[in-house]
Image (spheres, rainbow, N blue to C red):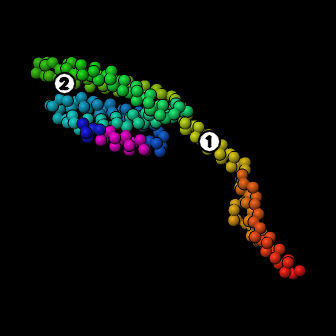
């Protein structure tokens, strides 16, 4: 159980960080769902001791594949629900996730012995039917996300802001930067966009002293 939680945390951090860079939330979720379905199927097969599989290793594989789904799905929810705040999206998702867990876990526990009766020389292990239900639920979620056609509203807003800033820069380019040119008397022009030109009076005082000396 501890190893399962550690792998979920590590995979969530790694996959979430990489996905935030590319913002390919939809593709990552579909990939994780498809691979997670195979991982769950391997768990179901490994329940049978005669299959030669290791159910513990299969569960750890599921932790790696299914663990990042929640944080990545949360980020995608923030993208499509913009300008709704991140905290609101996270609270809504956590609420529904906890409610679904509270509903489905008793069903899985109740059906753990279904189909495990001995059939001649063959007896199905416990939780076989529960894993079937979990695989079906996983497949339904995959189909649901595969038909998603939402828009990344937060990304579109960020790109719009960048375009607006670029257009303003093109309309009002900087004429002269501080320290790039002067008049030879210490008077440096400051003609940046949004700043008023200022003139240093160092050269003016020097010229005034030279004029007084000549007089």
10 Å neighbourhood of mark 2: few (<14), some, or many (≥20)? Answer: some
Q: Answer above or below: position of 189 versus 53.
A: below
Q: Nearer the viewer, residue 96 or 72?
A: 96
Q: CA distance from mark 2 to mark 1?
A: 56 Å
Disc 2, SS? loop
Q: Residue furthest bottom?
A: 214
In the rendered image, residue 13 lying in the magenta stretch gets the answer yes
Answer yes or no: is residue 157 visible: yes
Residue on which the image places disc 1 = 161
Q: Residue at x 15, y 31 (%)?
A: 49
Mark closest to the chain's N terminus, 2 or 1: 2
Would you identify the image quadrant in which residue 33 lies? Answer: top left
State left or right for residue 60 relative to residue 177: left
Going by the picture, which residue comes out furthest to the right?
A: 215
Report the predominant secondary structure element of the magenta stretch.
helix
Quadrant location of the C terminus in the rendered image: bottom right
Percent from the top left, x then y, of residue 90?
Answer: 44, 32
Towards the viewer: 38 or 9: 9
Marking on residue 126 = 2
Q: Nearer the viewer, residue 96 or 26?
A: 96
In the image as oriented, which residue stretches furthest toward the left? 121
Residue 64 in view here: no
Q: Quadrant of the N terminus?
A: top left
Where is residue 98 drawn, in percent x and y? Answer: 36, 27
Magenta highlight range: 6-18
Residue at point 37% right, 23% down?
99
| Above or below: residue 175 compared with residue 24 | below
User: In the image, 43: left or right of 137?
Assistant: left
């Amino acid at each position: 159980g501890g190893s399962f939680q550690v792998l979920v945390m590590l995979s969530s951090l790694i996959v979430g960080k990489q996905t935030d860079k590319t913002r390919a939330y939809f593709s990552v979720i579909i990939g994780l769902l498809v691979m997670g379905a195979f991982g769950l199927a391997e768990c179901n097969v490994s329940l049978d001791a005669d299959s030669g599989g290791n159910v513990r290793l299969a569960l750890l594989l599921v932790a790696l594949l299914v663990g990042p789904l929640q944080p990545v799905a949360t980020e995608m929810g923030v993208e499509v629900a913009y300008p709704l705040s991140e905290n609101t999206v996270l609270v809504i998702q956590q609420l529904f996730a906890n409610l679904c867990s509270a509903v489905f876990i008793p069903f899985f526990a109740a059906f753990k012995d279904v189909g495990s009766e001995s059939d001649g020389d063959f007896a199905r292990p416990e939780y076989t039917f529960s894993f079937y239900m979990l695989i079906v639920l996983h497949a339904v979620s995959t189909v649901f996300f595969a038909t998603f056609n939402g828009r990344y509203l937060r990304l579109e807003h960020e790109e719009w802001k960048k375009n607006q800033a670029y257009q303003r820069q093109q309309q009002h380019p900087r004429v002269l930067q501080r320290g790039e040119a002067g008049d030879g008397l210490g008077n440096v022009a400051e003609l940046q966009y949004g700043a008023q030109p200022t003139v240093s009076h160092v050269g003016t005082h020097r010229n005034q002293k030279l004029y007084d000396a000549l007089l």
